[in-house]
Image (cartoon, grey):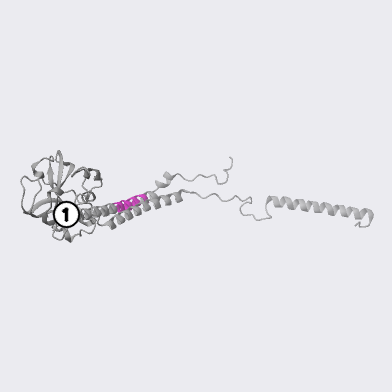
C-alpha cells in the first residue's frame, strides 16, 4: 500500500466539528448571548425614539410664551423656537403690506394663505398667517385693523425663492422673509406665526379658514441611547465571530512530523546498515593482514 505524502492529511469537515456536542453547545450559548445583546440594542433604540417623541411633543404642546421672549428682531430664527406656541400683541399693519401665498392646499381644495403684518410695541413687525382662502377675491382677504392679541405657532421661511413674484405684485409662490423685507419699509422678525386663535381685538367677518400648523421639527433627544444600541449590536456580532474563529481553529489538523529514517529504539551507528558497514570494514582489515603475513613468510623481510 503506497505511503501517504507528507502533510497530505485534509482538515476535518467544518460540519463534523460543529455537530459535535461541545461545539453545538457553545453555538447555542453564543446565539443566546447574541440574542440578548441584540434585544438590548433594540431596547436602547426604542428609548431614543420615546425621548425624541416626548421632546418634540413638549415643544409643540407647551404653554404659549411671548414671541419676544424667544428671540429678538435682531436675531435669526433659532432652531429651538421653530414649532413653539407664542402670543403676539400689537396692532394690525397697513393693508397694503398684506401678501398672499399661492398653491396652498386645505383639505381637498387649493387656495391661498393670507399673511398680514402685526406691528409690535417695541418696533418692527411679525408676519402672521391669518388663514386660508379659496381665491384672491374672497371677502375674507380684507385686511383687519386695530389692536390685536393672538396665539399661534412659529414657522420658518420656505426654501423656494419668490423674488421674481415680488416684482409683479404681492401674490407670492413661497413663504419667505427675505422676499417680504423688500416689500415693506420696516423691520420684520425672521419668522412667521400661524394664527390659531384670536384672543382679543376686532374680529373681521368673514374670516379665513384656520391653517393647521405643521408638525414641529424632530427634537433629537437621548442621542446617547443610539450609541448604546450600536454598542450592544457590535458585542453580539463579536460573540458570534469569536465562536466561528474557535471552530476554524479547532478543525485544523497540524501537519505530520517528518518521518525519521531510523527505526524506533535504535541509535545512530547501530542497526542493519551499521552492521553491514562494520562487517565490510572488518573483512577488509582481515584480508590485508593475511596478505601482509604471506609477504613476510615468502621473503623473510617486511616491505615498507
* Residue identifier under label 1: 126
- Residue 34: in magenta span: yes
Which residue is drawn at the image coordinates 70% and 52% (left, top)? 274
The x and y percentages for residue 258 are 59, 50
Quadrant in which residue 167 is drawn: top left
Mark 1 surroundings: few (<14), some (14-19) or many (≥20) residues within 10 A: many
Q: Report x, y in % for residue 292.
A: 87, 54
Left or right, 208 with reference to 9:
left
> Which one is in front, 196 or 280?
196
Q: Is residue 9 above or below residue 84?
A: above
Question: Which range is magenta?
Answer: 26-38
**Image quadrant for the C terminus?**
bottom right
Residue 216 colored magenta?
A: no
Indicate the position of residue 112 as horizontal and vertical percent values: 15, 42
Q: Residue sitting at 12 percent across and 49 percent down?
A: 95
Disc 1, SS: strand
Q: Can you give x and y, in whole percent of width and height, for residue 83 in the image?
A: 19, 53
The quarter of the picture where residue 90 lies is bottom left
Which residue occupies the foreground of this view, 248 or 47?
47
Position of 246 with respect to 218 (left or right) is right
* Total residue callouts: 1
Picture quarter with the N terminus = top right
Amino acid at each position: 500500500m503506497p505511503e501517504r505524502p507528507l502533510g497530505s492529511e485534509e482538515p476535518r469537515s467544518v460540519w463534523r466539528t460543529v455537530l459535535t456536542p461541545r461545539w453545538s453547545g457553545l453555538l447555542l450559548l453564543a446565539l443566546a448571548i447574541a440574542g440578548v445583546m441584540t434585544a438590548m440594542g433594540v431596547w436602547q433604540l426604542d428609548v431614543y425614539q420615546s425621548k425624541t417623541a416626548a421632546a418634540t411633543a413638549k415643544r409643540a404642546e407647551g404653554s404659549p410664551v411671548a414671541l419676544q421672549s424667544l428671540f429678538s428682531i435682531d436675531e435669526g430664527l433659532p432652531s429651538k423656537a421653530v414649532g413653539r406656541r407664542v402670543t403676539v400683541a400689537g396692532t394690525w399693519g397697513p393693508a397694503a403690506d398684506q401678501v398672499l401665498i399661492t398653491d396652498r392646499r386645505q383639505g381637498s381644495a387649493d387656495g391661498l394663505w393670507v399673511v398680514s403684518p402685526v406691528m409690535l410695541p417695541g418696533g418692527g413687525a411679525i408676519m402672521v398667517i391669518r388663514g386660508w382662502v379659496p381665491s384672491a377675491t374672497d371677502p375674507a382677504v380684507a385686511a383687519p385693523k386695530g389692536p390685536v392679541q393672538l396665539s399661534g405657532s412659529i414657522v420658518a421661511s420656505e426654501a423656494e425663492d419668490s423674488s421674481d413674484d415680488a416684482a409683479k405684485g404681492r401674490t407670492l409662490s413661497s413663504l419667505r422673509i427675505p422676499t417680504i423685507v423688500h416689500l415693506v419699509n420696516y423691520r420684520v422678525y425672521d419668522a412667521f406665526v400661524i394664527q390659531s386663535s384670536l384672543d382679543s381685538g376686532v374680529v373681521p367677518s368673514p374670516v379665513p379658514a384656520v391653517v393647521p400648523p405643521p408638525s414641529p421639527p424632530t427634537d433629537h433627544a437621548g442621542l446617547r441611547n443610539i450609541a448604546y444600541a450600536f454598542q450592544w449590536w457590535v458585542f453580539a456580532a463579536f460573540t458570534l465571530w469569536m465562536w466561528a474563529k474557535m471552530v476554524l481553529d479547532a478543525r485544523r489538523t497540524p501537519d505530520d512530523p517528518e518521518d525519521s529514517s531510523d527505526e524506533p529504539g535504535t541509535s545512530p551507528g547501530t542497526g542493519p546498515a551499521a552492521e553491514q558497514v562494520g562487517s565490510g570494514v572488518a573483512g577488509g582489515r582481515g584480508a590485508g593482514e593475511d596478505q601482509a603475513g604471506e609477504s613476510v613468510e615468502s621473503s623473510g623481510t617486511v616491505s615498507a
